[in-house]
Amino acid sequence: MSSLQPTPAVRRMAEYHPPLAGRSGLLLDFNENTFAPSPAVAASLAKLAAKSLTIYPERGPVERVVAKALGMEPAQALLTNGVDEAIHLVCEAFLSPGDEVLLAVPTFGMYPLFAQSTGATVIPVHAAQDFAFPFEAMLSAITARTRLVAFATPNNPTGSAATREQILALCNAAPQAAIFVDEAYFHFHGKTVLPTIATVPNLFVARTFSKAYGLAGLRIGLLAAQPESLRWVRKVASPYNVNSVALACLPAALEDEPYLDWYVQQALSSRGLLESALDSLGVPRWPSAANFVLCRIGPRHATFVTAMLQMQILVRDRSSDPGCDGCVRITTGTVEQMKRAIEAIRQTLATMQWQTSEAQQ
Ligand SMILES: Cc1ncc(COP(=O)(O)O)c(C=O)c1O
């Protein structure tokens, strides 16, 4: 037996293996853009010379472009290797063993993972059955040891959002903690607290280019906060954390606003179609402010997901998330794709002889 051992915190951590292998067909399982990034991104890629890959990437100039596009100061912007890295860096910068981290659950799996890796204690704050943001419970869970409060708005997998007032109240109630607001799905919701970083020192806002922009494979995200707060996070970041291909493509993606607006409109129209279809089929679902809908199939959730897969449509089984027994999450992409997916849902439920009463079990 090897004498090599990880830290006690790493030994205690659960492993996270999203079902990524061999995905093909209509991918409605990871909330990505289901179509393509802007054609301007393809043009930037085509212009990229292989020679440019010989040098280390420089993040600063693109941080200035992003900051300008979002009406921020460059010192308030840190580009990261996706929001995943932003979460990791915030945990590294602010958490020590014994610190408390409040997470509104169910939620995105990377928060507990990176928080636990530091030896901090994760305190799950459970949403009620309506999956609304558990604001009162979050507020009451704050203690002197709370060092991080992290949540997504809109949240994955529920689609529910926190209000600006709730976010500000949490920032005020826990000035000793970083309040990490993950706006990965901002474009589908349209509400943001990004400008508020100017006045609230413990507020961190994360944005991704993996969802509406269709750049999940490039791994690029943004962490925004006051320069003094962000300084600690910069200290633990690699100067080369964002690769040069991502940096070369991002300005073009940001500039092509008409394309972004088109894609967001498609995803929102699709969401409306999916919600109506689920309602007419009697499948319980939660209201969503994002590009996906969480619904409850009941005990035969796995049969449903497998049958959809056989029709080349991938949806995500979320039944093992807290409070999500029997639940499946379906990404909404273009309207044409959604019509195909809805037809497959109808057929699958009919073949299964599925009954609404199953979802109540
Ligand atoms: C809430 C939330 N935050 C962050 C991410 C990951 O973002 P990125 O691809 O920028 O790492 C996801 C991806 O599913 C997500 O749902």
Image (cartoon, helix red, strand yellow):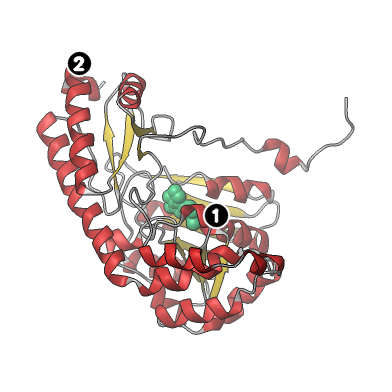
Mark 1, Cα crowd under 10 Å, few <14 / some 14-19 / many 20+, is some
Q: In which quadrant is the C terminus drawn?
A: top left
- On whether ligand 1 comes within 8 Å of the CB at mark 1, the answer is yes
User: What residue is drawn where x is 17% and y is 35%?
Assistant: 278
Return the x and y of residue 248 as percentages of the image width and height. 53, 70
Q: CA distance from mark 2 to mark 1?
A: 39 Å
Q: Quadrant of residue 91?
A: bottom right
User: What residue is drawn where x is 16% and y is 48%?
Assistant: 272
Return the x and y of residue 12 as percentages of the image width and height. 68, 36
| Residue picked out by circle 1 | 84
User: Looking at numbered disc 1 in the image, what kind of residue is underneath it?
Assistant: Asp
| Residue picked out by circle 2 | 351
Decide which of 71, 57 is in the foreground and name it. Answer: 57
Q: Quadrant of residue 48?
A: bottom right
**Lower position in the chain sequence, tag 2 or tag 1:** 1
Q: Is residue 266 visible?
A: yes
Return the x and y of residue 298 as percentages of the image width and height. 29, 23
Q: In which quadrant is the N terminus drawn?
A: top right
